[in-house]
Image (tube, rainbow, N blue to C red):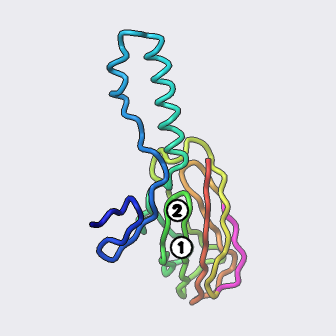
Amino acid sequence: MCNLARGLQCAGQTTQPNMLPPPINPQTLNALKDNAQVYETAQQTIDAHNQLLAALGPGVALTGAMFSASGGATIAVGSISGTVKRGKFTVMMGNQLTSAPTVTLTFPRGTFKTDPFAQLIRNGGTGKADFSYVETAGNITVTISKPTAGEQYGFQFAIAE
């Protein structure tokens, strides 16, 4: 029997076991409505539990639609893996480039309430150009300084609020 929650193989796919407990359903509070003090305490506990789960969870899976590029008609983003909190991607440079093209990863609405802390590093590719990045609550933008046409730039990132 296939059980992905335990990290077993299922139809050629595996997954890591989910180490987080399930969220608490607010409907659990209905039985406590007769006692206002206990109800309020339970509500605060459930909210804190569910906020912690959201913060510790892996985040939404990355998709190509979350990326946009500017600074050249032939820039492409590929080899995308991971989630909005930790992932990898590769930028492929075409032949028509500006001196500092950018790639932006746009987070789903509400992923971060404030500007998160991001760490982005190069992790492969054939290009040697420098890069910089800026993170906001809505996105992370990578600027590649003076890239060379035809080269690839691999990046890896981790983001936390």
Furthest residue in direction left, as rendered: 1
In percent of width and height, residue 56 lies at 54, 48
Q: Are marks 1 and 2 in contact (CB under 8 Å)?
A: yes
Does residue 140 appear to the left or right of 13 in the view shown?
right
Residue at image location 48% in from the left, 44% down from the top = 110
Does residue 111 appear to the left or right of 156 in the view shown?
left
Q: How many angstroms separate mark 1 from mark 2 (CA)?
A: 10 Å
**Quadrant hosting residue 3:** bottom left
**Quadrant hosting residue 144:** bottom right
Question: What is the tally of numbered marks visible in this picture?
Answer: 2
How many C-alpha atoms fall within 10 Å of the one at disc 1: few (<14), some, or many (≥20)? many
Q: Given the image, on which type of amino acid does mark 2 rest?
A: Leu
In percent of width and height, residue 141 lies at 60, 62
Q: Nearer the viewer, residue 1 or 68?
A: 1
Furthest residue in direction front, as rendered: 1
Location of residue 24 with respect to 79 vertically, above or below: above
In percent of width and height, residue 79 lies at 48, 77
Q: Which residue is mark 2?
A: 105
In percent of width and height, residue 112 lies at 54, 46
Residue 89's disc is 1
Q: Is residue 144 magenta?
A: no
The residue range painted magenta reads 127-133
What secondary structure is marked by label 1? strand
Q: Which mark is in front, 1 or 2?
A: 1
Residue at image location 59% in from the left, 69% down from the top = 102
